[in-house]
Image (tube, rainbow, N blue to C red):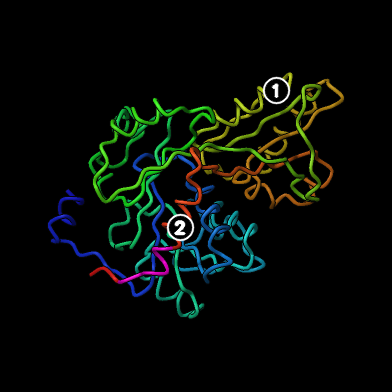
Amino acid sequence: VRNFLYDKKLLRSVSFGLPVIGIGNLSVGGTGKSPMAEYLAGMLKNKFRIAILSRGYKRKTRGYSLAHERSTALEIGDEPMQFHLKFPEIPIAVGEKRVEAIPQLLHDHPGTEAILLDDAFQHRRIKAGLDILLTDRGNLFTRDFYLPTGDLRDQKRSYRRADMIIVTKCSPSLNEIEKEKITKEITLLSNQSLFFSTIEYEEPYHIRTGQKNQIHEGMEVLLVTGIANPKPLKSWVEEKSKVYYQLSFPDHHVFRIDDLRDIKNRFEQIRAENKIILTTEKDGVRLLKFKDELAELPLFVIPVRHRFLFGEEQRFDELVSGFIKNFKRKD
């Protein structure tokens, strides 16, 4: 009903006089939105003065907030905190009412030339100039079901609002035949571009010291996850280590001291001498509040990034940069 009201202009969207790029999906999570926001931030930060705005899901505060040096994941949310730690030079703001948060962000940083809206595909109150829709190769929106049977939180036909669609978490060996099948299944509109990406895991680093450490066959790993879809990471750990164990928490889980004790106890039960604890960057920012307890614990965080397949990274970069350079307000 809500989509119908916006489509018929009975509910009005708001546009702004600068480039706004929306990143989102049709499902409840697990498509790689955070790594894509980081990819765009890393690609654009040296070309334009950009800012990132998120609603700050699962934070303990309300209203508009701009990240600063004393910010925590509880105050601004785990994903914005992750962006802030990785890109301290980029303004990171949160606000559940983003149509009100954008003017506040522009007041705080009037030189902003473009805004990335994280997890904003369903936020139709704002009309983004460029909408990027992500869908997981292992759970394409075309094959998914609506909640609670499946993971869809929006109509399948809403994909038509996207300017770009990225099929994420593909196998690095995805071939042209499979690519063509997926392309036909999605049924692109004439104005839409389709891309394929795979997830790459980089070298883990210690949560406190930043010291790097490689995972290898002789190492046993305790994998701690509180994310929507840990399957790709589990597969990566299976390939790298001989033995691994897992402690799973709900997506966006707020870790408590009892959880940390459980992690320590489970780790101590592993008898191998060469062992580490591994977690995601999203989980890592929620564990940082236990600074003293983490100092002596071999807890390593693993960065993740998108890599475009079929040599199309440059085309993607040029389309996004071109949108900003040639921006004209849509009314």
Residue type pointed to by label 1? Tyr
- Residue placed at 26% from the left, 51% from the top? 191
Q: Please indicate whether residue 220 sits to the left or right of residue 137 in the image.
A: right
Q: Which residues are magenta?
A: 322-328
What secondary structure is marked by label 1? strand
Q: Residue at x 33, y 72 (%)?
A: 16
Residue corresponding to mark 1: 244
Residue at point 39% right, 49% down?
A: 24
Q: Amino acid at mark 2?
A: Glu
Task: Kindly report the distance in space between the C-alpha atoms of the residues bearing marks 1 and 2.
Answer: 41 Å
Q: Position of residue 267 (x, y in %)?
A: 76, 29
The x, y position of residue 323, in whole percent, is: 39, 63
Tell which residue pokes out farthest to the right in this image. 273
Instruction: Check the picture and name the quadrant holding the C terminus.
Output: bottom left
What SS does tag 2 mark?
helix
Compared to residue 200, the image places residue 90 above or below, namely below
* Nearer to me, 265 or 184: 184
Of the two numbered discs 1 and 2 in the rendering, the one whose residue sits closer to the viewer = 2
Mark 1 nearby-residue class (10 Å; few <14, some 14–19, many ≥20): some
Which mark, by number, is residue 318?
A: 2
Please check the rendered image and state whether residue 182 is part of the magenta-colored stretch, yes or no.
Answer: no
